[in-house]
Image (spheres, rainbow, N blue to C red):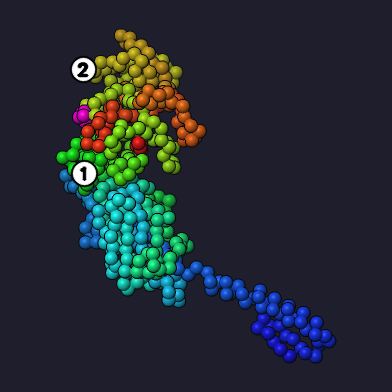
Amino acid sequence: MVRTESGCILKGGDMSTKGVHKALVFVCALLLTIFVLPGVAAAAAPQKLYGLEFLLPATTLTGAPNPSYNSVTGQLVPPVEVAVKFKNESPPSVGTSNIASIKFVVSGVVITGVACPRGICSFDTSTNTVSVTNISPPVHATETFVVTLTVNSCVAAGDATVPLSSVVVSTGSQVDNGSPFSSYSKDASFPLVTTLSDPGKIFTDPNNAAAGISCGDIDCGESFSVANSFCTSSVAGDPDCLTTVRGLDTDGSCAASVDYFATNNLVTTKNEKLHFAWQTDSFAAFAYKVNIPSTTEPYLQLAWLPKNGPPIYIPAPYCNVLVPATALPTQLPLPSPYGTLDQDVKLNSSKIQVTSLPGVGPPAVGSAIVIGSERMIVTGIGSNSWSVQRGDGFTTKATHPAGANVMFTALPTLDQDYKGVPYAFTQQQTSAGYKVGLKAQMCLASPLLDNHDGTWSGWIIDSGDGYMNW
């Protein structure tokens, strides 16, 4: 009797012929393949794995608050520290799976410095690529390795990322002379986080963990140069410099200061974006002056739709009122009140009674006004009332109480772009929510100015957490 590895028993006395014996051997060999080889295949599965977390720590390496803000102005004091944490997720028994070098790209922020333990770290300013080589001792299984970066300015939530496609983790002292690792996302204690995030939320509220770096807080009527360690104020058209102004809210109120955020990637490469956003106030209105690096006049594009997902751009519309690109913050066409309602406005009223502010005349016939969130067109000015066309720009007609502010708005409807070309939206733009006649949430408030230094400047009005591209 012979017992095989697979458990088959062959009894010589039962074999009447050699053919039967061969058949039984074949069957046992087949069973051996079924039961033994899967274990061999499993042993050959990928064993070099890494995890990654991109985080905004609450303190710097020296223990200082991070980010830091000016105690008087409330504005950001750059640079800011961010951390890219790597974990060796390889099984501990695999001795050839130690991490000795790493390379990755950071998008959305500009790197000014890098620090890493027991390795040689550097960064390429032209591509925002970070390299860490010669890590010694290497990062063993289950160990974490933290690369700390300093970045130059603020950034809107969701804009700062480490694209997984850019990450190279290797066993070699240089990333190109060792065996590569694969990313791993199934470690509940170390979730894969490639968007800059709040470390306190990646476990408790992962859907809202994306972190921005606030530029500071700003009240109505305040103006600041957005904090950026690369901004050179002596250069008129420096793309790293971004001036921002907050006006009255579009409904004429201004209850409190808001945190604002700006992702300024205009200086990096052509077709990078500017993203301006703020928290808590859906009626807030801003203006900001951009300096676009271009030797020829740029073709400006804006985006505020869709509300969720990547921005879909359209050619910029001009505002209803234009100012020079050299205009001062106090000269910008931000929301301002004509006066207040004398009496309630019913849902279908076509006339409103307004008490004008001292020294403020009525709007011209054909002008747009805003009450609450409803846009109206003034069709006539009488001695006691104004005639209006309700619900303009696809806004919703609503009742309005006596005392509500009647506001000037520079925001146009989407009829033609700033080059005078009538809008004809693509399917993608239409799906995002744009349509002819829609009330714009952004507009170009000045003709673009050639600074004769390889840059062009212009003012933008924004009431919609907007993006700018060119």
Determine crowd level at label 1: few under 14, some 14-19, many 20+ residues with C-alpha closer than 10 A. some
The image shows residue 122, relative to residue 14, as above or below, that is above
Q: Is residue 239 visible?
A: yes
Disc 2 target residue: 359
The one of 1 and 382 positioned closer to us in this rendering: 1
The stretch drawn in magenta includes residue 328: yes
User: Residue 432: x percent and y percent?
Assistant: 46, 35
How many other residues sit within 10 Å of disc 2, few (<14), some (14-19) or many (≥20)? few
Quarter of the image for residue 169 reads bottom left
> Looking at the figure, which quarter contains the C terminus?
top left
Please tell me which of labels 2 and 1 falls first in the chain. Answer: 1
Q: Give the residue number, with chain letter if any, for mark 1.
A: 231
Q: Nearer the viewer, residue 56 or 201?
A: 56
Q: Is residue 287 visible?
A: no
Q: Which residues are magenta?
A: 326-330
Residue lying at 34% horizontally and 29% vertically, measured from the top left: 443
Amino acid of disc 1: Cys
In the rendered image, residue 369, in percent from the top left (x then y), is placed at 34, 21
- Disc 1 on helix, strand or loop? loop
Q: Is residue 203 left or right of residue 451?
A: right
The location of residue 425, given as percent across then percent down, is 47, 29
Query: Would you say the magenta stretch is mainly helix, strand or loop?
Result: loop
Q: Position of residue 174 (x, y in %)?
A: 35, 66
* Residue in view at x 32 percent, y 33 percent: 298
* Magenta highlight on residue 82: no
